[in-house]
Image (spheres, rainbow, N blue to C red):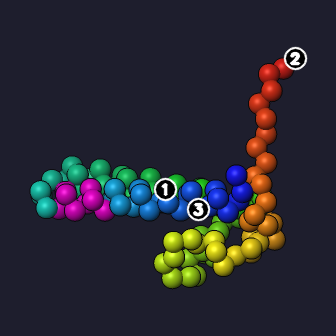
């Protein structure tokens, strides 16, 4: 998996979570259920934490949210970027995943 693929995956998970949060708020407001609004607020906090932790360059761990938000809404937030604007790592390079070898 490349860095670009990982960022797209995180991007779409964020949109899915945002949709669920929005739906929870709407259902809570329409049904006048304060518990759904409280749950929606908790889910919004989870959304914010997930976005803050996961939308980072795997190479330098730099926060990429500010760079990817400069464009208007797009289906592919990384299409205008070839390299990480913070460290210069190629977004098309493979993510190195340490292998979990059992001790011999």
Residue occupying the far left of the picture: 31
The answer to whether 36 is drawn above or below residue 69 in the figure is above
In terms of secondary structure, where does tag 2 sit? loop
Check if residue 24 falls in the magenta segment.
yes
Residue 10: quarter of image: bottom right
Q: Position of residue 102 (x, y in %)?
A: 80, 22
Q: Position of residue 50 (x, y in %)?
A: 52, 54
Q: Is residue 52 visible?
A: no
Does label 1 or label 2 sit earlier along the sequence? 1
Q: Residues within 10 Å of mark 1 (few under 14, many from 20)?
A: some
Does label 2 or label 3 sit earlier along the sequence? 3
Q: How many marks?
A: 3
Q: Is residue 69 left or right of residue 103?
A: left
Q: Is residue 103 left or right of residue 26?
A: right
Q: Is residue 80 visible?
A: yes
Q: Which mark is residue 104?
A: 2
Residue under numbered circle 3: 8
Q: Determine the CA span between mark 2 and mark 3.
A: 37 Å
Q: Which mark is residue 32?
A: none
Residue drawn where x is 87% and y is 17% of the image? 104
Q: Determine the CA span between mark 1 and mark 3.
A: 9 Å
């Amino acid at each position: 998996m490349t860095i670009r693929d990982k960022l797209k995956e995180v991007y779409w998970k964020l949109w899915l979570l945002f949709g669920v949060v929005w739906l929870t708020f709407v259902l809570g407001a329409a049904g006048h259920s304060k518990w759904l609004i409280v749950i929606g607020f908790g889910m919004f906090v989870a959304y914010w934490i997930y976005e803050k932790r996961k939308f980072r360059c795997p190479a330098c761990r730099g926060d990429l949210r500010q760079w990817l938000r400069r464009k208007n809404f797009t289906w592919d937030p990384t299409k205008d970027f070839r390299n990480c604007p913070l460290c210069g790592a190629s977004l098309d390079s493979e993510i190195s995943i340490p292998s979990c070898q059992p001790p011999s």
